[in-house]
Image: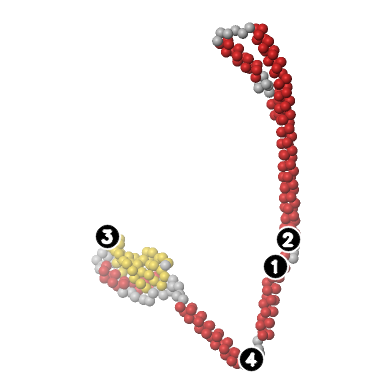
């Protein structure tokens, strides 16, 4: 049973006079008014006689309107379904064409030679252009042209060399922290630092320093320096500093960082 037929069989609104009469009797009973049975039966029969044709008329008219609305909705759904079916068919056809084209390109052995043909053609065009340029050269020209070309070439080389010379070269540098340990607590740490800083060489720059307690009253000298990697190494620094045997017991690299 469809939704419209269910609505057509519903009689709650078409039997409204019966419900009104029942409500009237209820309130009359509450207020102590008792209606006469004959009048009540006649009134009910009259209302039933009046209500039946109206109910049939209303049921038939509503049923017809509902069927008409259902038919119109079904027609619109059919039109929409046909349009969607057409769109899906077109998309499937386009997808099949695309798949067949991709499969053809993948199976075609002529794709690789075509890809290689482009550079070969460019080389051939370049060779042809060079041949045309060679044809334009005057083999019997004067020596003045050669001198002028040589002069221009030399000027360009000089300009390039000057430009390259002005460009600063990148120098690799490192920051090193050295731990210089004395022999005992009686070693003069200020003198030891003076000896350490007396080590001078190209690419070496001494920085800040401090005394760090080691234990038993002994302190070590922790000093920072910046070196050029191509000129100064940690081995050279350790060797030069340990030459001061009266003050220095050992030298360790505490930190090494590239700048």
Q: Is residue 224 left or right of residue 66?
A: left
Question: Regarding mark 1 in the picture, which secondary structure is present there?
Answer: helix
Residue 36 appears in the figure = yes
Above or below residue 136? Residue 18 is: above
Task: Tell me the crowding category of disc 1: few under 14, some 14 to 19, or many 20 or more residues within 10 angstroms, Cα based.
Answer: few
Query: Coloured how?
Result: secondary structure
Above or below residue 73? Residue 164 is: below
Q: Is residue 98 left or right of residue 180?
A: right
The nearer-to-camera label among 4 and 1 is 4
Q: CA gap, disc 1 to disc 3? A: 80 Å
Residue 134 x, y percent position in the rendering: 67, 84
Residue 87 x, y percent position in the rendering: 72, 48
Of the residues under marks 3 and 2, which one precedes in the sequence? 2
For the point 47% across and 79% down, the residue is 165
Q: Is residue 67 left or right of residue 177?
A: right
Q: Which mark is residue 115?
A: 1
Q: Quadrant of residue 216?
A: bottom left
Of the residues under marks 2 and 4, which one precedes in the sequence? 2
- Judging by the rendered image, the residue that carries numbered circle 3 is 216
CB-based contact (under 8 Å), mark 4 and mark 1:
no
Residue 212 x, y percent position in the rendering: 30, 62
The nearer-to-camera label among 3 and 2 is 2
Q: CA gap, disc 2 to disc 4? A: 55 Å
Question: Regarding mark 2 in the picture, which secondary structure is present there?
Answer: helix
For the point 31% across and 74% down, the residue is 198
Pick the front one: 63 or 105? 63
Pick the front one: 230 or 164? 164
Q: CA gap, disc 4 to disc 3? A: 92 Å
- Judging by the rendered image, the residue that carries numbered circle 4 is 141
């Amino acid at each position: 049973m469809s939704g419209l037929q269910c609505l057509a069989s519903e009689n709650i609104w078409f039997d409204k006079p019966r419900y009104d009469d029942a409500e009237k009797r209820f309130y009359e009973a509450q207020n102590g008014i008792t209606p006469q049975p004959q009048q009540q039966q006649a009134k009910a029969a009259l209302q039933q006689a009046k209500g039946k044709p109206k109910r049939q008329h209303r049921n038939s008219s509503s049923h017809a309107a509902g069927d008409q609305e259902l038919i119109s909705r079904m027609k619109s759904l059919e039109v929409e379904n046909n349009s969607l079916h057409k769109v899906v068919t077109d998309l499937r056809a386009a997808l099949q064409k695309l798949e067949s084209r991709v499969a053809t390109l993948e199976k075609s052995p002529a794709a690789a030679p075509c890809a290689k043909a482009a550079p070969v053609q460019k080389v051939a065009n370049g060779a042809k252009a060079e041949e045309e340029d060679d044809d334009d050269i005057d083999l019997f020209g004067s020596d003045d042209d050669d001198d002028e070309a040589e002069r221009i070439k030399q000027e360009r080389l000089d300009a390039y060399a000057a430009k390259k010379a002005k460009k600063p070269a990148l120098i690799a540098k490192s920051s090193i922290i050295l731990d210089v340990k004395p022999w005992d607590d009686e070693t003069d740490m200020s003198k030891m630092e003076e000896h350490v800083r007396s080590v001078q060489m190209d690419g070496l720059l001494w920085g800040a320093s401090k005394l760090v307690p080691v234990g038993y009253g002994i302190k070590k000298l922790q000093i920072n320096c910046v070196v050029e990697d191509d000129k100064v190494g940690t081995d050279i620094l350790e060797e030069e500093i340990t030459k001061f045997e009266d003050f220095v017991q050992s030298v360790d690299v505490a930190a090494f960082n590239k700048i």
